[in-house]
Image (spheres, rainbow, N blue to C red):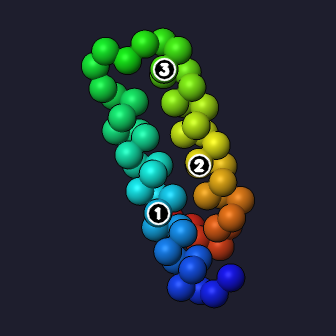
Amino acid sequence: MAKKDFAFEYKHMQIIKHALRHYLQREGASYQDLVSEIALLNRVENYIKEQFPFIRK
C-alpha cells in the first residue's frame, strides 16, 4: 500500500474513532446499544494500533 493510501485510511479510521466516542455520549442510548458500540470502538482502536504501529502520538 502506498504511503498516501496509509495516510488516507489512517485519517478515516481516526474520524470513525472520534465519531464513535462522541456518539457514545448521546442521551437515550440503551445499555445494549452502548455495549455493542463500545465493542465496535474497541475493534476500531485495535485495528488502528495493528495497522499503523509506526504512528505514535
Q: Nearer the viewer, mark 1 or mark 2?
A: 1
Residue type beneath disc 3: Asp
Q: Position of residue 31 (x, y in %)?
A: 48, 12
Say which element carries label 3. helix
Q: Which residue is mark 2?
A: 45
Screen quadrant of the N terminus: bottom right
> How far apart are the alpha carbons under marks 1 and 3?
23 Å
Q: Position of residue 8 (x, y in %)?
A: 49, 74
Q: Which residue is mark 1?
A: 12
Is 28 in front, or is 56?
A: 28
Residue type beneath disc 1: His
Q: Which of the 4 image quarters holds residue 49?
A: bottom right
Q: Which residue is mark 3?
A: 33
Question: In the picture shown, does residue 47 fall above or below 28?
Answer: below
Which residue is rendered at x = 47% and y = 49% of the image? 17
> How far apart are the alpha carbons under marks 1 and 2?
12 Å
Between discs 2 and 3, the one toward the N terminus: 3
Q: Residues within 10 Å of mark 2 (few under 14, many from 20)?
A: some
Say which element carries label 1. helix
Q: Nearer the viewer, mark 2 or mark 3?
A: 3
Question: In the picture shown, does residue 53 fall above or below 6?
Answer: above
Between discs 1 and 2, the one toward the N terminus: 1
Is 21 in front, or is 30?
A: 30
> How far apart are the alpha carbons under marks 2 and 3?
18 Å
**Does residue 35 appear to the left or right of 24 in the view shown?**
right
